[in-house]
Image: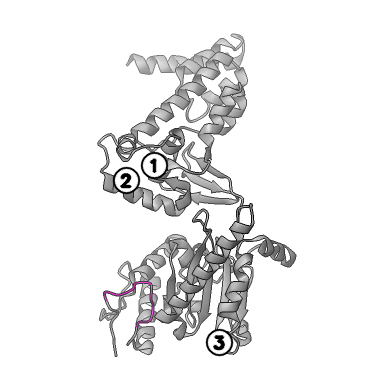
Amino acid sequence: MQSQPPTGGNPWVAVRPGDDVAMLARRVSSAHQLFVERHAPSGRAPDGEGNSVRSVILDSWMRSTSKGVNPDGSARAVDLAAADLATYRASHPMSIIRPVVRKLLVEDAADTGLLVAITDEKGQLLWVEGDSSAKDRALEMNFVEGADWSEDTVGTNAPGTALALDHCVQIFGAEHFSRSVHDWSCSAAPVHDPATGLIVGAIDITGGPRVAVPEVLSLIRATVAAAEAELRLHQLRSPHPLVETVLRLEVLGSGRPTLVRGPERIPLSQRHAEILLLLAEHPEGLSSDRLAVLLDENELDAVTIRAEMSRLRKVFGPANLGSRPYRLLAELTSDVRQVRGALDRGELAAALDVYSGPVLPGSEAPGVEDLRDELRARVQAALLREGDQRLLAKWTTSVHGREDVAAWEAYLADLDPRSPLYSQVKSRIDLFDQQYAT
């Protein structure tokens, strides 16, 4: 029997043909113990003899640790009453495919020790069905309808990790980050909206070690294919999208750039935020070469641009991004557009409420720097033109306006020379004069 994990093969499969399951269980348990106790980046057990875990598992353990997941914790219930959960499930796109999942997986799961779970896109369990005794045992780890099994909450687990990676995956025993799940194995895969490519949920099979063999992963993938075909048929019959979403890009201020999709807030890397912002500024589209120039003054090569766009499609949705030239195929609003719109309407106070700081302040992309300067200049010009004392006070005490000498001078000009505030503002301007004189 095989005592060491193979270096090749499918990295998403947990138990490979020829594996000694008992030996595999001991090896993974030892690696997990060492990782949790020492936070060992190598993911190797003490004896070092072929005890490394799969890279997909080690990466997930590292994410779990960085998110502060407690390996001795358990899933938490989402704050929904039973009636609210029923309403939420009934309106969720995954309810459309539930009959397919029941037909292909659930109907044969009785008395098998297996559970079949359907989650939403965030990892909340919508339905858990199958063997009744297994359901009773699963209560101990809170694997129940309504519980949050996202990777951020529970750590490494098949449905949560499948959603985090947007890929089918198997988790065997102690590969789970939470110790309460070490007696279980599972296989899961994400389900996508055929129209947008966005994840709408996941399908999972949970049970004993035999759930982690390649055949079960193939079964899950086949079920997902059938489920997505059912969603496609539903969309042909219905004029309404599966999920009504409003895409909004938030890039102002020092917070992490974020893509808002309905109630969901998706953190973005700075590069992805730069690309989306630039594409929103150029609805006609950008060639690979032009996008490279706007992103880096030294210009990026075409291979790097293609790689970034490929990663961005997984976040933004493949149906929402076009190529040749690169362009947005879905409407994308932004806080930048909101500020501009308020300025165009002469609503300066509303513009300042949204303008929480510069555009992507950490970005050095030439195209973004131009947008940053342009928006700040527009806001400043409107302030100086309006001369509103209250708004000038708000601006000059903000991060982006406290060094704005022109705004301070306009603020001073609107104050009563006899007021104490006049003296304070004038002393600030005098300090600027001294600094610039040196």
What residue sits right under mark 2 in the picture?
Answer: 305
Earlier-in-chain disc, 1 versus 3: 3
Segment colored magenta: 7-16
The image shows residue 53, relative to residue 408, as above or below, that is: below
Q: Which mark is residue 113?
A: 3
* Disc 1 target residue: 326
**Amino acid type at mark 3:** Gly
What residue lies at 59% left-to-right and 31% top-to-bottom?
Answer: 353
- Quarter of image, res 326: top left
Q: Secondary structure at mark 1?
A: loop
Closer to the camera in the image, 144 or 221:
221
Label located before the other in sequence (2 or 3): 3
The amino acid beneath tag 1 is Tyr
Circles 2 and 1 in contact, beta carbons < 8 Å? yes
Tell whether label 3 touches label 1 (CB within 8 Å): no
The answer for how far apart the CA atoms under marks 2 and 1 are is 10 Å
**Front in this rendered view, residue 318 or 169:** 318
Residue 226, image x and y in percent?
Answer: 52, 70
